[in-house]
């Protein structure tokens, strides 16, 4: 795991933003890794939105390792099928995927959201001897849903040429998922069930967000450093009263970084820790900074 993760490290976030912007969702499927990858014998990808990563994601990676995969990667897609982009910024999702990943587990970014495209890109980029994609039960339902495809059968044939699917159902969902697999005999030989401990299988990013929005503590639901990061940046926290209205502190941080990362700040190295502290100060300086951020002004970062 990463040690001393800094939520205000502009250099790390800038590198991740450049990697994200370098992937074209409209172009051919492409998969890129945050760290170099040697040609693996057996590769397992664990796709997710990581909004945020949870201990269930970690358990999936541990399960893949126990199955003998020598190259395991959390995989974030710049285009996530069936999900509207909200919550954590993409750069934060990648940072937290890195910090959540067990030792030896990497993080990759996909330009595509369809599993067939991800599998094709992984095969072309890394040429693994064996490729598996590990998903939750809800994703298997989506996989078979024809609404996501122009030609579902042709797309799934392409997927299963490149990869096998490993499905981790929730506690009360195993029989329904097994039946769903049986109902698709054309691809059933390339799909297998893998069970997590029931207490882990029920944990989801949605549950974490709900706990945080209610003012609760996500400890035990996410890895420790992820929990610290979420607290430090007030992600999914209830709005605080500033300027006579409810203010999303995480959104303020996003505005600060947009100024810096998009090149709208004239100062070379603004003190982002100081800016963040000032951004939620109830006094006049904080009000002035928030007004500048609302206007998208470069003067906001130059004022600290």
Image (cartoon, rainbow, N blue to C red):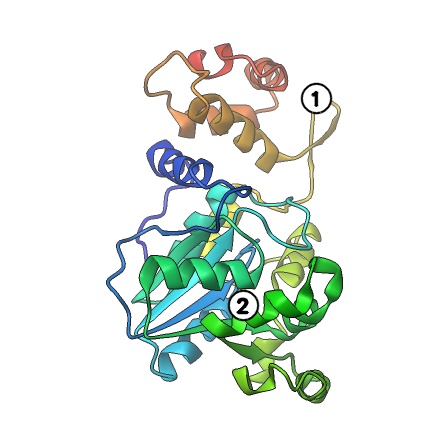
Report crowding for label 1: few under 14, some 14 to 19, many 20 or more residues within 10 A (C-alpha). some
Looking at the rendering, in which quadrant would you find the C terminus? top left
Q: Is residue 26 left or right of residue 172?
A: left
SS class, disc 1: loop
Point out residue 127 in the picture as x, y percentages from the top left corner: 32, 65
Q: Who is closer to the viewer here, 239 or 264?
A: 264
Looking at the picture, tell me which residue is in the foreground, 30 or 257: 30
**Residue hosting label 2:** 158
Residue in the picture at 36% in, 78% down: 65
Q: Which residue is mark 1?
A: 243
Q: Residue at image x 38%, y 32%?
A: 10
User: Relative to 127, is 302 above or below?
Assistant: above
Residue 109 showing in the rendered view: yes
Question: Which residue is drawn at the image coordinates 38% and 33% (left, top)?
Answer: 14
Q: Nearer the viewer, residue 4 or 215?
A: 4
The answer to whether residue 253 is left or right of residue 5 is right
Q: Is residue 245 above or below residue 1?
A: above
Q: Quarter holding the N terminus? A: bottom left
Give the image location of residue 38, x and y in percent: 24, 62
Q: Nearer the viewer, residue 95 or 124?
A: 124
Q: Quadrant of residue 151?
A: bottom right
Element carrying mark 2: helix
Q: Nearer the viewer, mark 2 or mark 1?
A: 2
Mark 2 vs 1, N-terminal side: 2
- In the rendered structure, the answer to whether residue 281 lies left or right of residue 150 reads left
């Amino acid at each position: 795991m990463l040690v001393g993760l800094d939520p205000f490290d502009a250099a790390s976030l800038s590198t991740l933003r450049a990697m994200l912007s370098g992937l074209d969702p409209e172009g051919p499927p492409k998969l890129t890794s945050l760290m170099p990858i040697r040609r693996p014998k057996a590769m397992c990808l664990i796709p997710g939105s990581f909004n945020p990563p949870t201990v269930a994601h970690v358990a999936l990676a541990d399960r893949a390792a126990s199955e003998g995969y020598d190259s395991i990667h959390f995989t974030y897609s710049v285009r996530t099928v069936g999900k509207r982009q909200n919550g954590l910024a993409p750069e934060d999702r990648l940072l937290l995927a890195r910090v959540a990943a067990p030792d030896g587990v990497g993080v990759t970014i996909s330009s595509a959201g369809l599993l067939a495209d991800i599998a094709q890109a992984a095969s072309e980029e890394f040429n693994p001897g064996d490729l598996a994609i590990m998903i939750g039960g809800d994703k298997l339902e989506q996989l078979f849903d024809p609404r996501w495809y122009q030609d579902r059968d042709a797309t799934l044939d392409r997927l299963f040429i490149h990869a096998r699917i490993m499905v981790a159902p929730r506690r009360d969902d195993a029989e329904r998922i097994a039946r769903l697999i049986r109902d698709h005999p054309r691809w059933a030989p390339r799909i297998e069930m893998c069970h997590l401990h029931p207490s882990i299988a029920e944990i989801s990013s949605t549950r974490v967000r709900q706990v945080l929005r209610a003012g609760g503590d996500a400890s035990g639901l996410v890895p420790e450093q992820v929990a610290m990061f979420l607290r430090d940046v007030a992600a999914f926290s209830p709005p605080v009263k500033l300027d006579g209205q409810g203010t999303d502190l995480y959104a303020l941080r996003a505005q600060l970084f947009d100024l810096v990362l998009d090149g709208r700040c004239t100062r070379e190295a603004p003190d982002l820790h100081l800016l963040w502290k000032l951004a939620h100060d109830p006094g006049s300086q904080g009000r002035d900074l928030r007004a500048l951020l609302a206007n998208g002004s470069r003067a906001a970062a130059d004022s600290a």
